[in-house]
Amino acid sequence: MCDQLSSPVAPFDADAELRSLGFSRREMLRTAAIALAAGGLTAVGGVGTALAGVPAARSGAEPQLKWLVGDHHIHTQFSHDAKYRMAQQLDAAQRFGVDWLAFTEHSNFAHADRGLPTARRLLDQERGSRNMLIFQGLEWYIPGAEHATVLITPGPRDTEVIRAFELAFDGKLNGWDKPADAAQAAEFTRRATEAIAWLGAQKRAGKVGDAVMLANHPMRLGIDSPHEIRAWRDANPDIFIGMEGAPGAQGSAISRNAGPGDQRGEYINSPRPDSWSGYPVDAYRPYGGFDWITATVGGLWDAMLAEGKPFFITSNSDNHLTVKDTWRIGDYPAGEPYASLPNEFDRWAVRGMRPDPIDTGLPQGGSDFWPGEFSRLHTGVAERSYAGVLEAMRRGRMWVDHGHLLNGLDVRVRATMPGKGKGRGNGNGNGWGNQAGSSATLGGRLTAKRGQDVEVSITITTTDYVNAAGIIPHLAHVDVISGPVTGPASDPDVIRAPGTRVVRQFDTTGRRGTFTVTHVFRGVDRPFYVRFRGSDGNRNGTGFHGSAVDPAGPLRHGAGEGDPWLDTWFYANPIFIDVR
């Protein structure tokens, strides 16, 4: 995740490039302002505030789902800090069972002007020869904040839209990266919400089929404040749908050049001047390989869920440089213009791509795993298509695991009649029944009547094969986490959900094959949500907010304890339960 951006090799006129694509910066900003106004979003002290209320999660019968393994954050030689050819990434992804992936190269002028169109031609060739869904996305530098994945379904104008988005709204390219004061920070937040709203407007106008965005490694630098994360989501909840629950670079503590203090995800930083001051120092470290925002029961993620806001997590490789592989960066051609250029970035920028890598036969430096090797994102699609993947992500039909901890996960929540009958009779439940067998799965919403029971069934299929580390994973426990839905927060920087806690832990030690565990919420009387996690049981302890909230949560690791294969977890997205 080394992504420092130098100046371009030659002056670049972004506005002229936009015009050549058929876009005007002024018209793009006007479109964004109209979209924000239509969505009921205004800027209050630079913070987006949803005026029209939070859209409800979708309800209704769940479709038959097929679970596809994906990775939405991968780099190639078309990023200035990565080295592999597309074909190498795709070969590895197929080897580790990946069904879909996205190439998300870093924004910069050389990428927009030179790398992107070249990459698209190669990508089209790969699409025609592989049984995979291959997105061409973007890693966006969010103005005043971290990065984000931008995914767009393939279509006649997708590359044009990506280029226009990059040139008009990228924080690095436009100098909107490190705010000097609160007023500038508010301006950068507004720029970010404009970008999200504009992309949503392109979807509504039919210029792209579909699009989603996700915040990447949100706690790496502490510069994604809670009010910014909420503002991005509220700018268009159908576009900005969530965040990486766990960062890539999971092998940084076992890499060839690892030091004793290295952490999974390269989470080794301390607060800097533009970091949000409300985060504790501990938040800059991973917990069981997951970001503090995700791993903390009753923390920021739960605070957003407690507002009733669907906001979902993912996991990915963020592959740039694979741990201890034998490939080095290729050699640039001799002579000019390369000989006179002062640094690696400027040499890369000549074509917007690095030379093909060279196999040395010796282990090289790197912090990443191949796509699907360690981190996996499981998406429940109704159809195997680009649109099907993005719709599954938008609906939150996703769970993630590390180290291939699980082979399958199915979660169903349904309302039942109190007592022995469980509402399964022939219409004699006097309105207490389970609504003709309706249920909800991950990311969904279920409606229960006050006083009904809500039954949660979690079906696990364990992994029966050896993973890339030579380990047959074993699941030690499954945790049910729940909290009340209390409505919009009065403070957009709140990071605490005091009503959320682990309500049940199932001991699954020694259980193999496919099995189901069940938890029942008795006589429900208020809306709530429920989410899920589990681990191999190797490293558990009191959670960040104490044992009453989380008695056996993930832990930070100390020197020499960062082997990711020895501390693996799964997390699943929430289900919301409305009570009428």
Image (spheres, rainbow, N blue to C red):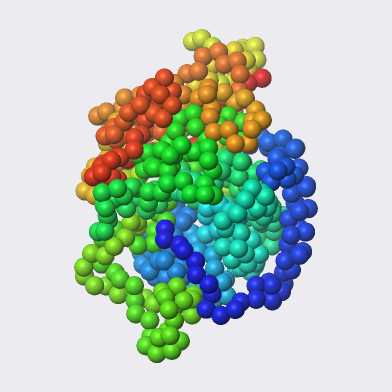
Q: Is residue 284 left or right of residue 473?
A: right
Task: Tell me which residue sits at (45%, 30%) in the image.
Answer: 297
Asked whether 171 or 413 is in front, the reply is 171
Across and down, in percent, residue 546 comes to 40, 24
Quadrant containing the C terminus in the rendered view:
top right
Q: Is residue 342 left or right of residue 40?
A: left
Asked whether 175 or 292 is in front, the reply is 175
Give above or below for 327 relative to 39: below
Task: Tell me which residue sits at (62%, 25%) in the image.
Answer: 486
Q: Is residue 244 visible?
A: no
Q: Is residue 390 visible?
A: yes
Give above or below for 43 relative to 125: above
Across and down, in percent, residue 31 comes to 76, 58
Give above or below for 327 relative to 332: above
Task: Tell me which residue sits at (57%, 40%) in the image.
Answer: 226
Task: Tell me which residue sits at (26%, 34%) in the image.
Answer: 538
Count the marks.
Answer: 0
Asked whether 21 or 208 is in front, the reply is 21
Q: Is residue 281 left or right of residue 390?
A: left
In this view, the residue farthest toward the top is: 419
For residue 527, what is the image quadrant?
top right
Across and down, in percent, residue 421 comes to 51, 12
Quadrant containing the N terminus in the rendered view:
bottom left
In this view, the residue farthest toward the bottom is: 335
Across and down, in percent, residue 213 comes to 57, 52
